Every structure is written in C-alpha cells, then in structure tokens.
Image (cartoon, helix red, strand yellow):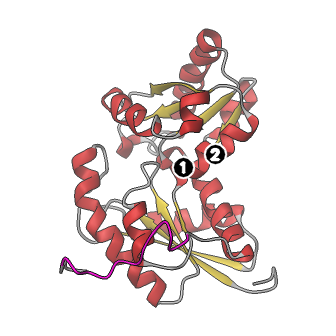
Amino acid sequence: MTLEDVLKIKVIMTDKAMDRETMDQRESMLSCAVSEKTEISVDCIKEGPDELDCNTDEAFASPEMVRRSIQAEKEGYDAIVIYCFSDVAIDAIRENVSIPVVGPGETTLAAAGLVCNRYVVITTESRNIARTYRRLRRYAIARDKMSSVRALDVPIGELRKDPTAIEKRLIQVCREAVEKEQIDGVVLGCLGMANYGSAIEKNLPVKVFDPAFIAVAYAEMCVRIGLTHPRASYPLFMNESHVNL
C-alpha cells in the first residue's frame, strides 16, 4: 500500500453509552493525526458496560470488542484501534483478525520509552491507580521508565464537561510529578483526556503522550508498511471451544 491509496481505520470504543454526535466529534478530532487519504470510523460496542472503570467492566466489554473487530475486517477496514488505554481484549482480537490491531496503551508506552527518561501515567480516579499500575508493570519498558501512576480524581464521564477545569487539574497533577519525581514525560492514561496535552506542555517542561492520536497514526503506518501480528504469536482462533462469536 502506498501513500496514494485510501485506507480505512475502525476505532472501537469500549463502552456502549456514547451517542453518535460524540462519536462523530471523535472522528473529526482523530483525523488530524492521519493523512487525508485515511478514513477514520468510530463506533462503540452495543452490549457491555456504559463506562469502563474496572476489571469487571473490561471482562464484559471484551466479547463484544472481539465481535465488532471481526465484523470490521469483514467490512473491509484495514486496521482496528481499541479506543481504551487498557487495550481491552487485544490478544483475543488478534487471534480472530489478520489486519493490524493497535492498543493505545502498549503503543504509547513504547513511544514514551523512546524519548523519555522518566514518565508518569495519569489516570482518572484514585481507585484506578492500582489496576493501572499492576497492568502496566507487565511491560518491561514501563518497569524501567514509569515513575508512578497518578489520578485526576475526575470520573470518566466528566472529562469533557468543563475542559478549562480539567486542564487546570491536569497541570496541577503533572506539576506535582515534575517537582517530586523529576519526570520528563506524561502519558495520558485515559482516552477521554485526548487533546489536553498542549495545555500541559505550555506550562511544564515535559512531553505529553496522547494515546488517542498516537494509536491512529501508528495504525496508519502499520497498514502502509504491512506491519501486523504474526500467526506464530497469535494462532488463528478455530473456535474448537464453541463460543458464540
């Protein structure tokens, strides 16, 4: 595939409560990170949690994420982006499709590891710190360079209601990390924080990594250069267990 070819990226949100207007806004926002020849389509799951806040929510979102991904490949999409920092069901999805499947979490950690010495991950609420920390520590790059996980103490559903207030809170939390942990990078650990990075960078000497934009840009690159998961690592699911897909 060349830069002249049109490609389609399916972005799947891991909650079912998102309305069409909001998803259209996400499509417009994410399009800024890819070339004009790339089309982004955002949809949410039809069954599962309204919001994804814990391991139980992840478990109930996963089956529908797999089904929607299989459907996306059948509909001719060239890549799939899981619109959640938790990379919900990413391994299972890769067992069921052949097109690139991008997880914002793992992709952003890799990007931050390339250019930062120490970074902090910002999550939504304090109750998510332990879950986020435990999951990210599975990655060697996070064990090496992640300084901490900090919380805004703002619920997911309120991240877009008052952007000015959220920006101020983000700057405050990040400034504390700069002063106490000498970080040089900030990873936005929820895709509801998309587009808030510029405000942080204007006020602090850090690089902000926005998973929403990194994920779609990386997905486009994967398609352009033919980079996808190998069957040696992700054997094709043959459904010998007779699950309902």
Q: Position of residue 126 (x, y in %)?
A: 35, 26
Identity of the amino acid at label 1? Answer: Glu
Does the CB distance between marks 2 and 1 fall below 8 Å?
Answer: yes
- Please determine whether, in this image, residue 82 is positioned above or below residue 231: above
> Which range of residues does the magenta coloring cover?
230-241
Image position of 19 (left or right of 165)? left
Which disc, if any, is residue 110? 2
Identity of the amino acid at label 2? Answer: Ala
Q: Position of residue 30 (x, y in %)?
A: 62, 62
Quadrant occupied by the N terminus: bottom right
> Which residue is pictured at 38% across the width and 29% down the height?
129
Disc 1, SS: helix
For disc 1, the marked residue is 106
Q: Was residue 234 drawn as part of the magenta stretch in this picture? A: yes
> Which residue is pictured at 30% across the width and 44% down the height?
53
Q: Main secondary structure of the magenta part?
A: loop
Pick the front one: 5 or 198: 5
